């Protein structure tokens, strides 16, 4: 499957406020106790920028041509916190897809590597910045034999 | 505190599939491999669901919090090497690799037995630990 490169795709942008219930559940999922002083668990820096930027995992899968179970993988995250995230604070987000490469894995199977970056601002300015890299595995075109297993 | 010091480990004795379902709802994550055993059966994975990457990273964050406090994390740069499945036992760990004034850089990892499934670096604020 060949997907039109989404490089340069910009998210609409928007704002997001982490809710108490949302942070409580998120923190519980990590097996930790709730943090003090309205601190949001740092792992909120996965979904908050995505949703706050006006996109979603669903839209990213569609834009990048995800092909079903097993076709999407995580390669890496680079998350910067200029200050701790807090519940009840309005953050403004902007970002987009900043990298798209057609690659072949160590077994000879094709995949597209996509990176998106989002910056997150509060009233003081830049509060956090993320770059996530995801892998979209592609089926071999008919007649092409890659490495097995 | 010095370069080479090991950080206290954070253990998750059995990754809980119920938590993956809650996490999928919080993230608005449509990827079936995290909550639908049929999806992973289709992949030949014996129906065990796959833990979300952010949850794997969260165990490393929790390990850092227990060492340097809940406002200490400044940067996380990680690679995901292998998937983590429900009922897996994993342990997050780390080691101080550099210290510069009020910041420390740490090698961090998540292991399943001897296998490293997530690895990378973390920068933490250590000003309050002096």
Image (cartoon, coloured by chain):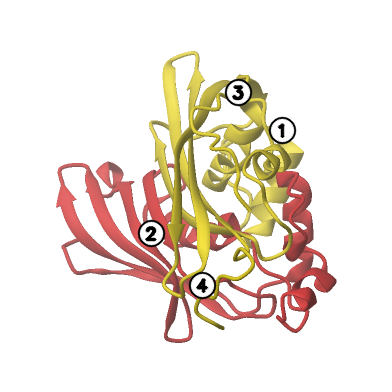
Query: Which chain does the numbered disc 4 sit on?
Result: B
- Element under label 1? loop
- Element under label 4? loop
Mark 3 — residue? A89
Q: Locate residue B115 relative to residue A17 in the image: left or right.
A: left
For marks 3 and 1 on the same chain, the one whose residue lies earlier in the sequence: 1
Which quadrant: the N terminus of chain B?
bottom left
Query: Which chain does the numbered disc 1 sit on?
Result: A
Q: Residue at x 63, y 27 (%)?
A: A52
Q: Residue B122: where, in percent of width, then height?
A: 34, 53
Mark 4 — residue? B82
Q: Residue B9: where, in percent of width, then height?
A: 43, 72
The chain painted yellow is A
Mark 1 — residue? A19
Q: Are marks 1 and 4 in contact (CB under 8 Å)?
A: no
Q: Is residue A74 above or below residue A55?
A: below
Q: CA distance from mark 4 to mark 3?
A: 35 Å
Closer to us: mark 1 or mark 4? 4
């Amino acid at each position: 499957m060949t997907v039109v490169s989404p490089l340069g795709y910009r998210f609409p942008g928007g704002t997001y406020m982490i809710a108490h219930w949302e942070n409580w559940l998120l923190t519980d999922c990590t097996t930790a106790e709730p943090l003090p002083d309205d601190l949001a668990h740092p792992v909120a820096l996965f979904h908050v920028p995505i949703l706050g930027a006006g996109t979603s995992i669903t839209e990213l899968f569609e834009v990048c041509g995800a092909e079903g179970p097993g076709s999407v993988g995580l390669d890496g995250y680079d998350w910067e916190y200029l200050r701790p995230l807090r519940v009840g604070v309005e953050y403004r987000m902007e970002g987009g897809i900043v990298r798209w490469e057609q690659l072949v894995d160590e077994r000879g199977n094709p995949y597209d590597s996509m990176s998106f970056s989002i910056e997150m601002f509060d009233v003081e300015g830049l509060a956090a910045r993320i770059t996530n890299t995801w892998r979209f595995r592609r089926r071999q075109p008919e007649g092409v034999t890659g490495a097995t297993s | 505190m010095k370069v080479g010091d090991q950080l206290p480990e954070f253990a998750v004795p059995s990754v809980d599939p119920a938590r993956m379902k809650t996490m999928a709802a919080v993230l608005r994550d449509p990827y079936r491999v995290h909550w639908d055993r049929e999806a992973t059966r289709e992949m030949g994975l014996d129906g065990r669901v796959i833990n979300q990457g952010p949850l794997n990273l969260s165990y490393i964050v929790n390990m850092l919090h227990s060492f340097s406090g809940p406002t200490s994390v400044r940067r996380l740069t990680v690679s995901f090497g292998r998937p983590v499945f429900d009922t897996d036992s994993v342990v997050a760990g780390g080691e101080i690799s550099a210290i510069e004034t009020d910041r420390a850089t740490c090698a961090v990892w998540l292991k399943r037995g001897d296998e490293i499934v997530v690895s990378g670096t973390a920068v933490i604020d250590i000003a309050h630990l002096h």
